[in-house]
Image (cartoon, rainbow, N blue to C red):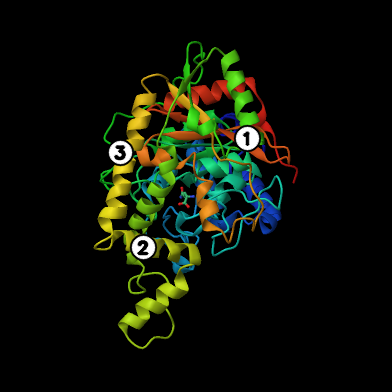
Amino acid sequence: MINATLKELSRHLTSGEVTSVELATQYLDRIKALNPALNAFITIDGEKTLEEARAADAARAAGEAGPLTGVPLAYKDIFCQEGWKTSCGSRMLDNFVAPYSAHVVERCRAAGMVTLGRTNMDEFAMGSSNENSYYGPVKNPWDFNAIPGGSSGGSAVAVAARLAPAALGTDTGGSIRQPASHCGVTGIKPTYGTVSRYGMVAFASSLDQGGPMAQTAEDCALLLNVIAGFDSHDSTSLERAPEDYTRSLEQPLTGLKVGLPREYFAEGLSEDVAQVVQSAIDTLRQLGAEVVEVSLPNTRLSIPAYYVIAPAEASSNLSRYDGVRYGHRAAEYSDLVDMYERTRAEGFGDEVKRRILVGTYVLSHGYYDAYYLKAQKIRRLIADDFRKAFERCDVILGPVAPTAAFDIGQLADDPVQMYLSDIYTLSINLAGLPGMSVPAGFAGNGRPVGLQIVGNYFSEAKMLNVAHQFQLATDWHARRPVL
Ligand code: GLN
């Protein structure tokens, strides 16, 4: 059961082969056994989980079950969930128990899904390696010396290590796709505005987007069906008719036009990753896809633009952590300003402080035009690059990250190198486009490598179709680390 997909679990629950309580118990036991080494979860609460599972079993018995009723799910610790500690990986929120639930959590709950626990992450979702968590680094189950990727590393590891059949993550500049790639799981960041940000702790509001991480594209589609949709509590939530993201999974890929951006296969891409991506492209070609070369000339500007815009928004969003209303407050202080300063000095880690400093600087009078405004202009150019590219193809393919997972500690003291590893993911967020990562092979050192699929706005069903057909033809997504 532990290796079953959501689709299979749904079937087993429907047939009565297993109950939700039995399923939850199996996962909780596995979490208990493996989490001390992996550190994928920040909070588990068996009693709460089992209570939800019992309610799901009762709903089934009463004939009120939907397809995912009773199926367990893990949440990145960034989604507020009523009654659960919601730390966002930070000391600042170590004592924060959410008084309400995020829109996506409400939706999963309404679908009858059972909470397995809250997964580890980089503090306030800032990072690419999960080394920035107040709760310590997460280990990659394929190789305990490797980073799992970030910032949704706990969610990726939970799925890869089969501590959960699926998990939710968030992606501001790659945080679903990059850990999915490094851990050999499937993850999708939807078009900006598709999934409500209400109750999702804010990092960079114009970029943040929640999404599913699971073993297969089909499971991601099932989860997206649950979490996507308009929410009046989020002013950037898009009011569109509901979609069934599974509707095109079975379509053949004959005639599919696949764009390969020249700039994604240039200097900086490791040989290992290039080979894996190339062989994935060959597979898609065999499935009937046609390859065209496209160009995204402003790709290299995505790093400076993102690392101005994201910190700018973060510095504003994180100003709410002042020690007054909730979260950490310094124990000793002389006056109000001293209380603010000590609270923030103690509550935030180094990377978060770095972003607040950069963000405050680029927004300050005299520098705003030179940095923030300029970055916004680049953002437009990047979106235009994609608009032009999508005139010639249906999806764009490329690597997710320049290398397979690096070692824990390898880039920890070199933030600029760390930022450079986001080169293939950031521009997708800057443009607001959907992107996904699909397991596509392994590097020479045995660490997983993902294929990135980027789609035009609202083409999630098409991307999931491409990923599903790829997964029918390959078994990379079904490989498991030995634990
Ligand atoms: N690595 C990027 C950053 O550190 C992206 C993080 C994310 O998507 N949350 O900001």
Q: Earlier in the sequence, mark 1 or mark 2?
A: 1
- Residue shown at 58% from the left, 39% from the top: 181
Q: CA distance from mark 3 to mark 1?
A: 29 Å
Give 48 or 227, whichever is nearer the viewer: 227
Question: As shown in the figure, which amino acid type bears the numbered disc 2?
Answer: Leu
Question: As shown in the figure, which amino acid type bears the numbered disc 1?
Answer: Val
Query: Where in the figure is residue 452, as x and y percent of width and height?
Result: 52, 32
Q: Residue furthest bottom?
A: 334
Labels 1 and 2 touching (C-beta < 8 A): no
Q: Residues within 10 Å of mark 1 (few under 14, many from 20)?
A: many
Residue 314 sits above or below residue 192 on the image: below
Query: Where in the figure is residue 239, as x and y percent of width and height?
Result: 26, 35
Q: Earlier in the sequence, mark 3 or mark 1?
A: 1
- Residue shown at 33% from the left, 41% from the top: 379
Circle number at residue 380:
3
Residue 225 sits above or below residue 350 on the image: above
Question: As shown in the figure, which amino acid type bears the numbered disc 3?
Answer: Arg
Q: CA distance from mark 3 to mark 2?
A: 25 Å
Specify the quadrant of the image occupied by residue 226: top left
Residue labelled with disc 1? 273
Q: Residues within 10 Å of mark 2 (few under 14, many from 20)?
A: some
Q: Is residue 380 visible?
A: yes
* 196 with respect to 181 (left or right): left
Query: Where in the figure is residue 122, as x and y percent of width and height?
Result: 52, 56
Circle number at residue 318:
2
* 448 with respect to 396 (left or right): right
Give 51 or 417, whichever is nearer the viewer: 417
